[in-house]
Image: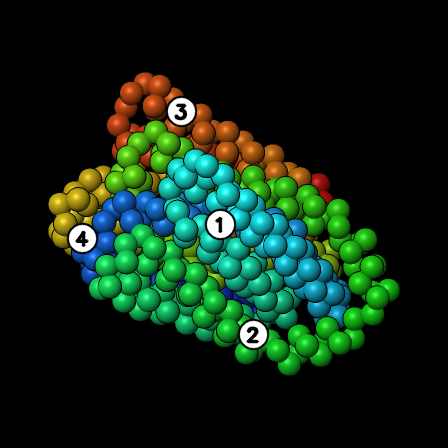
Amino acid sequence: MTVYLKTLFGVGDESKFRRNFLRVAWANVIALALPTLAAPLLSRLFLPSDFGALAVFTSILSTLLAFCSWRFDWVMPNARTRVMAATLFVTGAGVLVSVCLIVMMVVLVLFALPVPEARTAGLGLLLILLPVALFAGGLRDLLGAWFVHQGDLTAKSRATIFESLTNVLASVSAGVAAMGSGGLIISNTLATWAGISSLVHHSRKLLWASIQRISRKRLVAGIVRNSRTASWSSLSAVVSALSQVAPIFLLTYFYSQKEVGWYALMYRLLGAPMGVLTSALGQSFWAKAAEYARADRIEELGRLYRKITLRLMYACLPVVAICLSGPLFVGPILGRTEWDGAGYVLMAMLPLFVGGTVFSPTSHLIVLDRQHWKLVADTARLVLVAVSIGLARYWGIGFVAAVWLASCASLIGHVLLYLMHLRAHKSA
């Protein structure tokens, strides 16, 4: 894998971007291998409906994570000084605490209402974990942005490994204990907190020293200077998150939880591991893009963007092969007859994985102050995905075909975002 990454992305010179990518990617290869190796065991310990419930929980969580820190974590890499980055971290953390308290109150109010199914989305008391998981996810994003600003992603890669290992061990333990969907949700939450503990360990000295230098004047100036960018970014992030979780919500509404469980596990097996690798590239590229933007080196940024996108197309070839061969190997590996249709779902998700792998990692319109363009692209993707699933249900076609239509719609949205990046480089 290391040789493959070196060949594909030309890693081997003194480029900070490439060193960061290889360092994080190598650690993430370990992290993504763990859930993949554990999948045959987990598929025998849990039912597809259990993974469907987990997908609903994580979809709600992802939507809330899109704005829980008002996306000051997206603004942090653009900060010109370490103290300003720490100022944005504190501001984002303050927003995060407020949002988590509001979510906690909303959850408690929902449990006081008379209709159980309507108030809990089928998750029952597990919805109580939502503010806990939200605080963990938001803090992880803020700490991760701090390391992106520093241009050193070693700590982030170690945290990813620790988080993945914790998730696998906790999920297997919960499966042996026959905890069902609750075990998967609890394991996912525990894993996030495990990753945070690693990030806090590596950031506490430098981050705390920078926080101590924050004055009231700097705090107010940081909020005033970055609130507009953060607001646009939050709106864009919410729409982007909705476009990603819309298939889960809509498919859950129109189809059975068992079929949604197929979708959820296939995404966990391939989408999540690919997300780990593309996240490594995205964080490294983001740090470099912010550096280029601060120095007004937009032409060089555009060349790097096109170069990396082209190479990501080559990197996507193994993903294509895996998806197309899904019906041949998924059933025998997962074991239970309940998973027989999952291989065809994996094949139908091919356009979704291609779009997420090729175009998503290097999105950087925020460093060009064009985050409102991203909002347009994400809104278009959300509408296309929703309409495609609605049409599938209207036409009465099956679950696999609905997933294929939604995946194609998502790919179209990603291509639109790529074209906007090309336009932004010319007009910046």
Residue farthest to the right? 217
Disc 4, SS: helix
Disc 3, SS: helix
The residue type indicated by label 3 comes to Gly
Foreground disc of the pair 2, 1: 1
Residue farthest to the bottom? 205
- Quarter occupied by the C terminus: top right
Residue that label 1 marks: 61
The residue type indicated by label 2 comes to Val
Which residue is located at x 45 percent, y 50 percent?
127
Measured in 3D between alpha carbons, the distance from the residue under mark 2 to the one under mark 4, in whole angstroms, is 37 Å
- Quarter occupied by the N terminus: bottom left
Residue 157 shows up from this direction: no
Measured in 3D between alpha carbons, the distance from the residue under mark 3 to the one under mark 1, in whole angstroms, is 23 Å
Residue that label 4 marks: 334
Residue that label 3 marks: 390
Mark found first going from the N terminus, 2 or 4: 2
Measured in 3D between alpha carbons, the distance from the residue under mark 2 to the one under mark 1, in whole angstroms, is 22 Å
Query: Residue 201's mark?
Result: none
**Near-viewer residue (349 or 217):** 217
Mark found first going from the N terminus, 3 or 1: 1
Disc 1, SS: helix
Residue that label 2 marks: 200
Mark found first going from the N terminus, 2 or 1: 1
Mark found first going from the N terminus, 1 or 4: 1
Q: Residues within 10 Å of mark 4 (few under 14, many from 20)?
A: some
Give the percent coordinates (x, y) of residue 385: 44, 32
Foreground disc of the pair 1, 4: 1
Say if 76 sits above or below 303 in the image: below
Mark found first going from the N terminus, 2 or 3: 2
